[in-house]
Image (cartoon, rainbow, N blue to C red):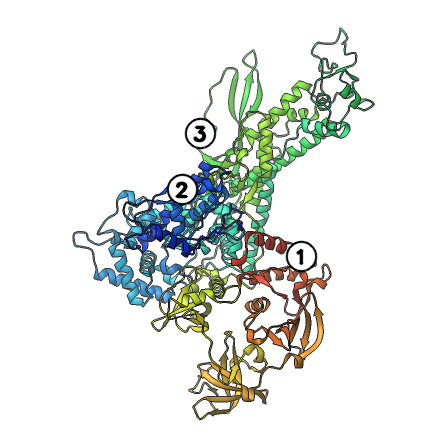
Amino acid sequence: MLNAGTVSLPPRVTPQLSLLSTEPAALPLLPSALVAAADFNAQVRAPVPRQSGLTAALGDRENLRTLGQKLNEIASRLGVNASPQAVLAALQTTPMQIHPDSSYPIRAGKAATVEIFLRSIGLGLPTNHFQLTGHAHAVSDRALEHPLGNFGGGLSWPVPMSAGEQRRVLAAATDHGSQNPNAPHIGASVGVLEYLNANRPLSDEALADPAKALETLVSSTRGQALGQAIQDQLGGVATDTSVNEYALSAIHLLLDPESITAPHRNRVAGFDLAQHAHWGRPASTVLERLSTYLHENYKTSPEMAKAGAYLLLARKAPEFLIKGIPDRVTYGSPAWVSLAVAAAAIEAQFPGKVAHMNFAQVMSSAENAIVTNRAAAEHAQKAALVDWGVANGIVTRQASDSYSDVEIDRARTAFNAQLRLTLAATGLLEADIPSRKDIALVHLKERFGEHVPFEEKRLKVVDSKQPSAQPLYDPYRAPAGLYSLLDIAMSGLGHYTWETRDPHIAEAIKGKRLDFGVNKVFNEQFEQAIASRKQGVRSAIRHLVATLPLADRENLEFGKLEFFQKNTYELGLDFTSKKRRGADNKLWVKATGRNGDAVYEIDLKAAAISAVPASELTTKRERQANKTFKTEHFNPKAVNEAALGPKNQAGLSTPPISFSSTRTQHIADAFVEHLDLDSDDVKAYARGVTSFDKQMATEWNVTNFFLDLIPLRSAIANFSKGNHLEGASDLALDVFGFVTAGAGVAAKVTKAGAKVASAAAKAIQVAKVVGVAAIQAFNPLDGFSDLVAGGAGLLGKGANLVRATGAEVVNKLKGASGSYDLLKAASKHHDAAATGTFKVAGQNVDGGAVLQNGRWYAFDVHRMRPYGSPLEGFTAKTSAMDGAIITRPAESGSALNNRLFGDYGVAESNISGLARNSQGIYAAADGHVSHIRHTDTAGNTAVYEVRQVTRTADGAVQAQIYHNNRQTPLLVQHLQGDQWQRLGARGGNPPSVASDLGPKIGGGGEGTIYESLDGKSVYKDYGPSSMTAADDFVDNETLCLNSYYGDGFATTIFEDGRRYLKMGKLDGVDVNTLARGSLPPEARLLLDDAFRRMEQKNLYHNDLQLSNFLYSARVNKIYPVDLNANGLEDMTPFLASLYKRDRDELRRAYYALIAKA
């Protein structure tokens, strides 16, 4: 079957295509990866063993690039109607050049074909054009990923190196360098990059490509020796990439040692990426300035500066490395915010990919990347908002990089307001100039129907003979000659009496008026279009001012302003009189302030405000025939002269809020007035007082005038090597730096004629802005403290993001069905594998780990390999060994579930300061009160008071749990550490369903809902079932509820031939029963919080309706119920689009329940 939007590839090759992808699809065809590999080996038996390591990985990457090119070439050559037979023949006969360093096993002198190579990597064969392009996109996309990731090494692990580990890496690297110095004739190296390059220096050509230069240095003898020495020193787990990762970690820390003790989100090697000198500058400026800084501060040589800058930015700020970023997308602009968020979302899933993408690829991937990586996207949105807010005067910059939720929300509100205005202005700038013909045709068809020849010239005025005294060219003379119905309607000639010899037309107009009021409708629409365009121009000028460098913004905000026009005059026949014939569309502004004079040229057509020499205002232009040119003061009537005077900026600590400042509005108003969009000539035309022929000419002239004035979208290059089909994507950049799709026609418009202009206007209207959206309110519980100083505790990722990543790891290892297939697979290659918790910077983090040589190591679930030093304090929750889940035997009892028996628990403070003795007991100093702490199989911890502590004949410690000075039925036995087991003899079992079933409280299509007798649980009775507890069946809803609320919250029970679901009772009311406007304003974000939590836990609810959610006024929370959900891996693009649609509809229905603030 067709899997729309994705291509099925084996894990080593498959790019994780976006959840909501709209790219061409291909079949996940058989044979499978294993069958394909076997089939390939039967054809080509390679005597050469597969290579491994970085060199081979880079070769494999080149193979994928080549494959993508070949598939695109075949698709282009065969065309869209290619038959399966033609496609197969092309695959079998098209040679595939294999990179010599790759791991592909090939016999010397034997060439592969595209078919053989596809089978070798487990990718099914495409059978049509659609699948060819889908395969090409998939493998080309994967080729963008680099084997070294983002070149961050251990600093970019899912849980990065701690500060202590970083200090050890730095010390080990320094020691290694001291013990292995350069040869005397080489001398000391400037820095670590020069040290690695000393023995076999790279050529200038190699240094020109920073990524390849770094690849060579890391894989060099010295690079490998450095990484191995550090790995040995730290006891790191050995993998096929670990030495490279330790080497890269050392390079980073030697270049940027201050990041260990003073990490900062926007600082690399002491260089401030967010400094005000970068505001309003393109990314290339930042990259160049960082390179200069590195060699001027002796961190690198001039030759190695680009490689050093690339390395630092690839990990910390890869958006600066994106290829082909238009200069119009400057740091601190709204477009930069969108770019930075998109880059971060992509990097969260594929570290290191962004640096190898171009601008168009990043923005085209933005929406899907953000949907797929919500936690990373939200973290990036907060960071980008702070930087934008600081650069635009909304938020005061804090040296600590600590910002409150109030400041973040202030920046978000201002950003969204500016975004709304600029997005609206995109349409206003291109408001349709009305067409008399279109208006006339609409009226004609309404009156006469569709089948009348409106454009045939077959009518004339009855008795059109003119009085002899009437001037020959009198514009008010009756029209002579033949006219069409369209002519009559467009020209407003309906008050004349018309006749025709065409029986069809005569019958159609018989008894009907020919006055349609076209001019009136046209004039109204024309005036509205002019008003819209003027408003669009104002917003565009405000945007251009706000995205200037800070010094220029301050000049315009605080200086005395004078405006200048360049006017054109036409000399009279006497060569002394002259008449003004218009002005240049550009406007010049002279700003006089504390830094002297500065002159700026405002050019809307070029979408730029540029500083120009003062001579621009004084240089005279030579006369051309009878035309003279003069630069003159322009005094806008719309702006008070006093408002343009100098302003005091002393004592201001923040930059001007340029976009919304009064001064910027004055500049925008002056520019609109200068354009004279509603001049007398245009108004006269709009009133329709010119003759028919002149009206027609004027209409085309006005259309072309606006085409000349308004900045058209500039095409964005989106071609990758050999990937011509992808390059055909119709993407363009508008004046605001927004990427639009479907506007390529608009970018090609010329003054060729009105028909072209009309087509362009329609293309502009349907253009879709790509990768830009308002930023939703953040969960106030998330806060922003984890972004402080780059997340010093968790090394730049932020605590919430690391925790979300950990939860994602656990979910992936567990799987949507709870089968733990990935965990089982990992256990086959190690002594054991487990999910559990471990300490990072003093905080508990969920994650996966594998056991190797008696030590637990963190596990990277995306790359399916361990990393780093041995974990401290790892507590396993679910473990697997040899491909099977390990279950601890309970000889005479069952598990002590803290959720079921938590009511007997006491506060953790009861054992504060106490140590656990050899019996597992926390005994008070006076010996009178004893407690145990128990961590159950779900990882939940509880403290219980115990008495009657005894030791059995075989040495087991048992105790009776007490609560409120009364004995409970729970007898427990110590297992190990803080783990206890409930004994059956005196502990008993939970009550049967029949004995615990209380009153009916609800029901629906799935079953009847009962409350438990104690009021703490509810039962859903699914009805009769042939299953029993021996079948070991757990329904999906139970798995989903436990994933969301925690293990033990819900359980599947079979009793007396019926199936039940027992779950904890949630405090709340059915949201569907709430009246419109009944929820308080503070409840607005609660549903979004629930969605965020579900999606973080890989739960995509498949029955989204208000009745499946409860609202608790007591705790101000929304609870999902009837929680049947799909996992992300099960969401086909079709299901994903349905989910997105249903989620949006549910949000709208929920928001209607919120009372107005």
In contact (CB < 8 Å): disc 3 and disc 1: no
Disc 2 crowd rating (10 Å Cα; few below 14, some 14-19, many 20+) is many
Is the residue 793 above or below the residue 383 in the image? Answer: below
Q: Which element carries disc 2, helix, strand or loop?
A: helix
The residues bearing labels 2 and 3 have C-alpha atoms spaced at a distance of 56 Å
Task: Examine the rendering and report whether any part of residue 646 can be seen.
Answer: no
Is the residue 846 above or below the residue 42 in the image? Answer: below
Residue on which disc 3 sits: 615
Mark with earlier residue (2, 3): 2
Mark with earlier residue (3, 1): 3
Q: Amino acid at mark 1?
A: Tyr
Residue 751 in picture, x, y percent from top left: 55, 26
Residue on which disc 2 sits: 70
In contact (CB < 8 Å): disc 1 and disc 2: no
Residue on which disc 1 sits: 1151
Residue 376 in picture, x, y percent from top left: 49, 57
Q: Amino acid at mark 2?
A: Lys
Residue 1061 in picture, x, y percent from top left: 62, 72
Mark with earlier residue (1, 2): 2
Closer-to-camera residue (820/540):
820
Residue 865 in picture, x, y percent from top left: 38, 63
Q: Which element carries disc 1, helix, strand or loop?
A: helix
Closer-to-camera residue (1002/334):
1002
Task: Using residue 469 as the reference point, say whether residue 780 is left or right of it.
Answer: left
Is the residue 496 above or below the residue 8 in the image? Answer: above
Task: Using residue 414 as the reference point, say whether residue 691 is left or right of it.
Answer: right
